[in-house]
Amino acid sequence: MKASVIVVFHSGAHHLDDSLESLARDAESGAIEVVMVDNGSADRCCDEARRRFPWVKTIRSEHNLGFSGGVHLGAEVASGDVLVLLNDDAAAEEGLVEAHLEVLATSQNAAVSAGRLSSWDGAKHDFVRGAVTFDCHAFQLGQMALVTEIEPPAVGKELPFACGGNMAIRREDWDRSGGFDRDLFAYFEDVDLGWRLWAVGR
């Protein structure tokens, strides 16, 4: 499977060293495709990205489309069989893309692989798993708990949703489901997608 990593920026030139730099080795070797979406940034961070990272594929919207719209814009130009989403203010640990692909390869019924997000020093969880209540409220379980205190879900464990800041989805599932709901400008677009995928048995 070929992976396209989509990173959506909104006035995020100061985050280029976080996200794009962390993907440089795999991108330069051709192991992955990186798509940067400049989501109406006043600082036109795509210009700086093209100068510093010639391997990145950039696309710019003149208006902020929200996270959902930005990911859709990136997906339109991505060529991978798997779309990996990474927040612009996050750095990928070595092997992140490979780990996502391995999970999807070993679990054919899984549409999405959920990645863990932690604090910059690696000490605390930001996202390790989520939960949805009967009235459709969603929560990040264990947020800000010490990494040593919470065991992450086992590989292949079924989860209600993945966090959009670090997740991978098969392209066919993205297309079939319609991806993120563009009306959800920011937040809960990942929860909604997980809900809809569960509803069709994925």
Image (tube, rainbow, N blue to C red):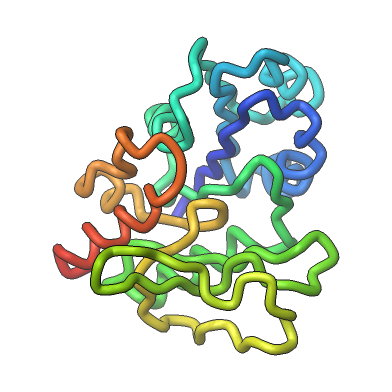
Quadrant placement of the C terminus: bottom left
The answer to whether 160 appears left or right of 35 in the picture is left
Q: Is residue 17 above or below residue 121?
A: above
Spot the residue most to the right: 121
| Residue drawn at point x = 59 percent, y = 58 percent | 97
Question: Residue 135: x, y in percent?
Answer: 25, 67
Spot the residue most to the front: 135
| Residue drawn at point x = 80 percent, y = 31 percent | 14
Q: Nearer the viewer, residue 88 or 112?
A: 88
Spot the residue most to the left: 200
Question: Residue 134: x, y in percent?
Answer: 24, 73
Question: Residue 54: x, y in percent?
Answer: 73, 24
Q: Is residue 158 above or below residue 173?
A: below
Q: In this view, does 20 lie above or below 199?
A: above
The answer to whether 1 appears left or right of 90 in the picture is left
| Residue drawn at point x = 76 percent, y = 26 percent | 13
The answer to whether 40 appears left or right of 70 in the picture is right
Total labels: the figure holds: 0
- Classify residue 71 by image quadrant: top left
Spot the residue most to the top: 62
Question: Residue 59: x, y in percent?
Answer: 53, 20
Quadrant placement of the N terminus: bottom left
- Classify residue 78 by image quadrant: top left
The answer to whether 121 appears left or right of 67 in the picture is right
| Residue drawn at point x = 80 percent, y = 60 percent | 120
